[in-house]
Amino acid sequence: MKYPKYKYVFAVFDFAVILISFFAAKFIAIDILNKKLILDDNSLPSIITFVVFSILFIFIFQNNYLYKINVFLTRAPQLTALLKSFIYGAILLIIFSFVIKFSLLLSSRVFMLCFIATGFIGVSVVRLFILKPYYMNFSKILHNSNVIIIGAGKSGKLLAEKLIFENFYGMRIAGFLDDNIEAGAFVFKEMKCLGKLDEMKSIVMNLEIDEIIIAIDNIGYEKLMSLIDRCNELEKSVKLTSELFNIVPEKIVTETYSGIPVVDLSPKVNKNINYIYKRVFDYVASITGLIILSPVFIIISILIKLTSPGKIFFTQMRIGKDGKPFKFYKFRSMKINSDSDKERESFMIDFIKNNYAANLNSTKIINENNITSVGKFIRKTSLDELPQLINVLKGDMSLVGPRPCLKYEYDSYDDWHKRRHTVMPGCTGVWQVSGRSTVSFRDSVVLDLYYINNMTPWLDLQLIFKTFPVMIFGRGAK
C-alpha cells in the first residue's frame, strides 16, 4: 500500500507498544496483583492472539484517523481517538474470547483493565512525547517528501504559502507545473515554474518527487479526471485540493495541510490483488448473509404476498462494470405495473443533466401512492435491497462499490460520470453512508470516484459497518 513513510513509522511504534502492553498487563495481573489466570506463561495461542490483536489495533487506529497528520499533531482529539480505539478493541477482544473460549480473558477482568490502562498510557506517551517531538524536529528525515504543485494560480500559491510558513509536514516544495506560465518564471518567493504538464513525467523522475499536489484553478471535471489519471500513472502519492471535490472533506475525514483540506487520490492496493480479495470476500459474505438472513427473507416474502398481489421479487436490468447490463434483484415495494414511470425517467435525466441542489427531499421522484404498506417500511430501512446478495453471489455486484444505474441514466452520463462503472457496482458505498438521497448526483459521482481511488479491504469493512446504522435509522432513504 502507498502511504507516506511517517505513517509506517507510527504504525510500527503503535504495534510494538500495544504488543508490549499485552505482556505487561499479564505481568501486572499475575505477579503484582496476584491474580490467578488460567494461562501458561509461554502459551503459543496467547502469543499469537496478542500479535494478531496488536495488528488489529493498527486498523482500528486507522479507522479513527490516528494516522492523519492533522490528528497526530493535536493533543485532545488524538487522546480522545486513542481512548475510543482501545475501548473498541477491548470489546472486540472480549467477544473473540467468548466465541473461542479463550481462557485468558474469561478468567480475569483485571487483565483487560490492565491492558487498556497500559496500552492507552503507553501509546499516548510514545506518540505525544517521543514521536511528535521527533516528527516536529526531524520531519525531513521522517517524511523526506519532495513535492510539486500543479497549478500556479491562486489555489497553488495559497497552498505553497501555508506549507512554507506552517510546515509541520517535512515537505520541500520543488516548484510548480503550469501550462500558462513560462518555465523558470518565479511563482511564489523563490519557487519557480518547473515546466508544462506534458513535462511532468521527466520532472518527477529527475527531481525524485514523492508527492504531487493538484491545486489547479478553472478546470472542468473531465480534464481534472484525466489529470489525476496521468499523475497516478507515475505511482507517486497524489493529493488534490479543489472546490470540485469539496463534498469529500464535507462527508469524510481527510487530511489537512495547514488547514487546507486535501483529498488523497492515489490507489493504495494493487488492482488485481484487490479484485481477488473482494471477490473471495463477497462470495463468502453473500453466502453467509443469505443463510443468516433467510428468516428475514421468508418474513418479508410472506408480508409482500399478504399485502399486495404480484411477485415477491422486483427485477430490473441495471448497468454494471464496464457498462455491461445485468438482472438486478430487489424485494417488490410497489404495486404491480407501477415501475414503468415515465415521470421518474424524465426527472432523473433532468436531474443528471442539471444537478439539482442537494436539499431536495429525494434525488428520485416516486409516486408514493404506488408504494405498498410493507414497501414503505422496507424502502425506509433498505431491507428491499437484501436480495442484491444474490447479485453479489452471482458476481454481478460487490458488497461495496458505486450503485448500478438504469440504462437511460447511463446514456445520460457525461464521460467522466461513467468512470464510476470502471469497477463492479456495490450494494453500499461512500455516498450511501454519507446521506444517500440527500446527496446530489454530481456529489455522488465524486464520492464514488474517491472510493475507486482509495479502495482497500479496510475501507470496505468500514463502509459495511457504517451501512447498518444508516439502514436502521433510514437516513436519506425514500
Image (tube, rainbow, N blue to C red):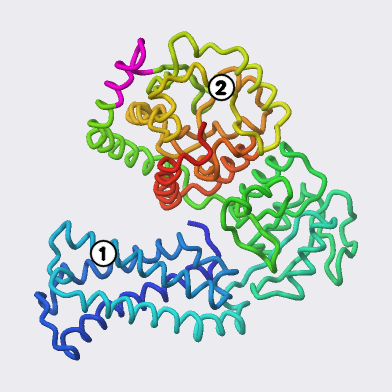
Give the side of residue 79 with respect to residue 282, left or right: right
Q: Answer above or below: position of 372 versus 233.
A: above
Image x and y of residue 367, in percent: 55, 19
Q: CA distance from mark 2 to mark 1?
A: 45 Å
Q: Amino acid at mark 2?
A: Ile
Q: Answer above or below: position of 328 versus 141.
A: above
First-in-chain label (2 vs 1)? 1
Range drawn in magenta:
300-313
Q: Which residue is mark 1?
A: 93
Q: Amino acid at mark 1?
A: Leu
Image x and y of residue 157, in percent: 82, 62
Image x and y of residue 416, in percent: 66, 33
Q: Is residue 393 magenta?
A: no
Q: What residue lies at 36% left-to-right and 14% top-to-bottom?
A: 308
Classify mark 2: helix, strand or loop: loop
Question: 107 or 209, which is in the foreground?
Answer: 107
Give the side of residue 332 with respect to residue 208, left or right: left
Image x and y of residue 264, in percent: 60, 54
Classify mark 1: helix, strand or loop: helix
Q: Which residue is mark 2?
A: 366
Q: For residue 126, what is the image quadrant?
A: bottom left
Point out the frontmost of discs 2 and 1: 2
